[in-house]
């Protein structure tokens, strides 16, 4: 009996586990602390020590050997493009993916470009660089804008566009920090009006290869796709050169398994100028829009009943991928009825990526916690949801709860809609987003998502015009309008039905199955509730530090405690008049309970605080200087310029910078702030003093 270890997590792990189970294979999942919803879909689960172990070849192989697996499926991300994983396996374990020699070329963006160039396939001017100075020299020779890329980047990581020389060095540093191999290259930036991102789905058996048509992925934020459509808006005539180029490269590689060959196409040029971009030698996030789905009922609390077959071609890609590596290792494209050229795609499919991000803050991650009651998935004919916010039914379990942390990608779910026409698929997508609820509709949750962006995009006239004017930078140029359109539509969708008396709402909102006083979630709070508050300072005697106060709630506006509580109160330590308040719980990781860190004062402009949770990668020289033992030698302190990075921190393997709000000097650094530590949202990084008030 074949037994497969899925070396991944989240929705793609569930996708693969389901497909393998349908084939009768035994399945093994990997999981980490607070991230285990996918493991309920496996026959066996193995806990990794840390999230970093998903990138640890030795840990993955050890898990597969100990579980006596016959196969390893890498999913996407993590080790899916690393030749090191299949090379570490002995003959008793089969790697479900391309050969190590194919991965070596396909996973290296420069080697892939070299392959394309050798086959007379057009590429953008580019070269490998070892330093920022070398990158500047090359950029001058080909002209700005240019793109700096990590050879092993992906998912928007390790990539920066540079429009002028002054910003190249900083972009180079950030890309270098996001590259595991510390290898970068620079190429001419082909972005903006006219340039569309189109990719071809390839499948091969090691001898023969075939395509399954193309997808368009031009709606992107920070160079990461958030919307995919199939087929693209290109004519079949314009698609043909991309198909031919993909097949030519795949045949040269003797490709086996699933792969995607990506291109940029300029629709504003008469002959549709195009260039090869890169190869993704694995299953992709957007694979769902390439095949066909059958309809299944959707429970509002889970998505377990959904099919896992894709949209426009009728091919279950993951099932086909697994079958190509079945135990006898002799399954061919012919056996799968995939050897002959596929018929033209039928219908149109749209995939929307739902992410835990705040679009109003540069799409920064919005960590937090979701419970079963916080989620309402869309359903109906032509709608499919792939998500990790679910679990296989297990008797005796409590309400499911999921943690969105900083270690993994922000993807929460993929909503895929299918229609006979592009317009029909669009209407299903809009309806689905209006039905979707993540984290409540009345402000009780601070979890931010990109739902408004996706809905606004679908309502924008450029999308309604069949996406003809949407290019790879379209969302960045139109984000404000898109957000407004989406927010207005979302608000309208949340109105109560007529005839429902809002006054019947109670200030007590119990959990299903809980009762007042049970200690679970919301608590009974009423106007007039009196509290006694005792304040004391650690390390001092009670007589020295203890202060007692009384607080009474005079009104309650909203009770969703602990997520949110608003109203007014009177107290013995503030003005005797009622004071209005709003208390909301941050969904980011909290500040250390040990007191190792301190909070920034949001009302003090000289306090520089962390906008979110992340791992400190680099400190400005002025912060390191302020932390060093004082010599008081009268030397001038290092000046921090306005807009200059004060601190660099990593979130989901992407580097983010916190900049100085003014020209000034560092008065002091926040407690516990040092390279390598994880800081929570609201942590004080440093206190500045403006330049004109500083000692010279």
Image (cartoon, rainbow, N blue to C red):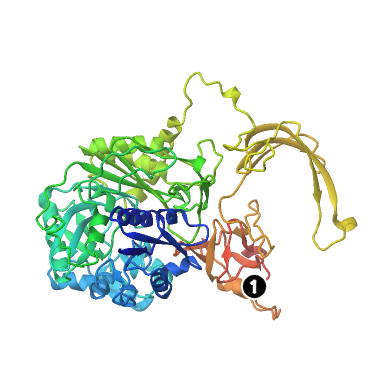
| Residue 646 placement (x, y as % from top left) | 55, 66
Residue for point 67% across, 39% down? 581
Point out the image quarter for the C terminus.
bottom right
Q: Is residue 195 left or right of residue 57?
A: left
Q: Which percent across, then down, holds residue 615? A: 53, 65
Foreground: 68 or 667? Answer: 68
Depth check: give the residue in front, 175 or 435. Answer: 435
Instruction: Work out which quarter of the rendered image holds the N terminus and state it.
Output: bottom left
**Based on the displayed image, in which of its 4 quarters is residue 504 positioned?**
top right
Name the quadrant containing residue 273.
bottom left
Q: Residue furthest top?
A: 499
Q: Is residue 295 above or below residue 597?
A: above
Q: Is residue 29 above or below residue 55?
A: above
In this rendering, the count of numbered labels is 1
Q: Is residue 290 left or right of residue 77?
A: left
Q: Say above or below: 359 vs 126.
A: above
Q: Position of residue 115 (x, y in %)?
A: 18, 72
Other-residue count near label 1 (Cα within 10 Å), few / some / many at <14 / 14–19 / ≥20: some
**Is residue 333 something one can see in this rendering?**
yes
Residue indicated by mark 1:
626
Question: Residue 383: x percent and y percent?
Answer: 31, 39
| Residue reaching furthest to the front | 1
Q: Going by the image, does 45 lie left or right of 600?
A: left
Q: Secondary structure at mark 1?
A: helix
Closer to us: 267 or 639: 267
Write down the quadrant of residue 7 in the picture.
Answer: bottom left
The residue that appears at 48% across and 67% down in the rendered structure is 48
Q: Is residue 260 visible?
A: no
């Amino acid at each position: 009996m074949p037994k497969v270890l899925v070396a991944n997590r989240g929705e793609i792990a569930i996708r693969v586990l389901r497909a393998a189970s349908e084939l009768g294979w035994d399945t093994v999942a990997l999981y980490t602390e607070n991230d285990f919803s996918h493991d309920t879909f496996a026959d066996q689960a193995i806990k990794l020590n840390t999230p970093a172990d998903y990138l640890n070849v030795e840990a993955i192989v050890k898990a597969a050997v100990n579980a006596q697996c016959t196969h390893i499926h890498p999913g996407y991300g993590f080790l899916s493009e690393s030749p090191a994983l299949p090379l570490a396996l002995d003959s008793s374990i089969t790697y479900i993916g391309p050969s190590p020699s194919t991965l070596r070329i396909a996973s290296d963006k420069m080697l892939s470009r070299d392959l394309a160039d050798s086959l007379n396939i057009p590429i953008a001017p580019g070269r490998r660089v070892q330093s920022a100075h070398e990158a500047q020299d090359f950029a001058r020779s080909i002209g700005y804008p240019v793109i700096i890329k990590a050879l092993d980047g992906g998912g928007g990581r390790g990539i920066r566009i540079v429009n002028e020389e002054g910003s190249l060095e900083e972009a180079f540093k950030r890309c270098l920090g996001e590259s595991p191999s510390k290898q970068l290259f620079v190429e001419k930036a082909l972005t903006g009006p006219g340039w569309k991102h189109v990719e071809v789905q390839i499948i091969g058996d090691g001898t023969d290869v075939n395509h399954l048509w193309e997808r368009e992925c031009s709606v992107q934020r920070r160079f990461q796709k958030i919307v995919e459509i199939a087929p693209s808006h290109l004519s079949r005539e314009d698609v043909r050169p991309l198909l031919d180029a993909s097949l030519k490269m795949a045949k040269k590689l003797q490709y086996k398994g699933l792969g995607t060959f990506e291109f940029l196409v300029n629709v504003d040029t008469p002959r549709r100028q195009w260039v090869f971009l890169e190869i993704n030698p694995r299953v992709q996030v957007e694979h769902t829009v390439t095949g066909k789905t059958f309809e299944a009922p959707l429970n509002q609390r889970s998505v377990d009943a959904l099919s896992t077959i894709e949209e426009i071609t009728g091919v279950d890609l993951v099932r086909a991928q697994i079958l190509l590596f079945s135990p006898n290792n002799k399954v061919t494209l012919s056996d799968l009825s995939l050897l002959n050229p596929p018929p033209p795609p039928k219908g149109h499919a749209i995939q929307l990526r739902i992410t835990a991000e705040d679009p109003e803050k540069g799409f920064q991650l919005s960590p937090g916690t979701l419970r079963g009651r916080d989620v309402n998935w869309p359903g109906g004919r032509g709608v499919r949801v792939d998500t990790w916010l679910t679990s296989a039914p297990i008797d005796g379990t409590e309400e499911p709860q999921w943690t969105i942390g900083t270690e993994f990608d922000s993807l929460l779910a993929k909503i895929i809609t299918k229609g006979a026409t592009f317009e029909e698929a669009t209407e299903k997508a809009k309806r689905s987003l209006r039905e979707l609820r993540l984290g409540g509709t009345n402000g009780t949750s601070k979890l931010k998502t990109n739902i408004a962006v996706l809905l606004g995009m679908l309502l924008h006239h450029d999308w309604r015009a069949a996406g003809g004017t949407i290019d790879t930078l379209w969302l960045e140029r139109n984000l404000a309008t898109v957000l407004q359109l989406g927010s207005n539509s979302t608000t309208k969708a949340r109105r109560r039905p007529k005839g429902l008396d809002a006054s019947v709402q109670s200030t007590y909102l119990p959990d299903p199955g809980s009762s007042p006083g049970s200690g679970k979630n919301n608590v009974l709070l009423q106007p007039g509730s009196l509290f006694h508050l005792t304040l004391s300072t650690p390390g001092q005697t009670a007589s020295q530090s203890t202060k007692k106060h009384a607080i009474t709630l005079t009104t309650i506006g909203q009770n969703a405690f602990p997520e949110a509580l608003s109203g007014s109160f009177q107290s013995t330590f503030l003005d005797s008049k009622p004071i209005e308040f709003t208390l909301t719980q941050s969904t980011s990781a909290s500040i250390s309970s040990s007191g190792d860190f301190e909070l920034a004062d949001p009302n003090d402009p000289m306090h520089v605080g962390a906008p979110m949770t992340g791992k400190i990668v680099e400190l400005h020289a002025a912060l390191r200087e302020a932390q060093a033992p004082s010599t008081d030698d009268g030397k001038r302190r290092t000046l921090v310029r306005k807009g200059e990075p004060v601190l660099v921190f990593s979130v989901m393997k992407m580097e983010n910078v916190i900049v100085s709000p003014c020209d000034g000097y560092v008065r002091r650094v926040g407690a516990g702030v040092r390279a390598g530590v994880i800081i929570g949202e609201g942590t004080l990084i440093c206190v500045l003093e403006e330049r004109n008030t500083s000692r010279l």
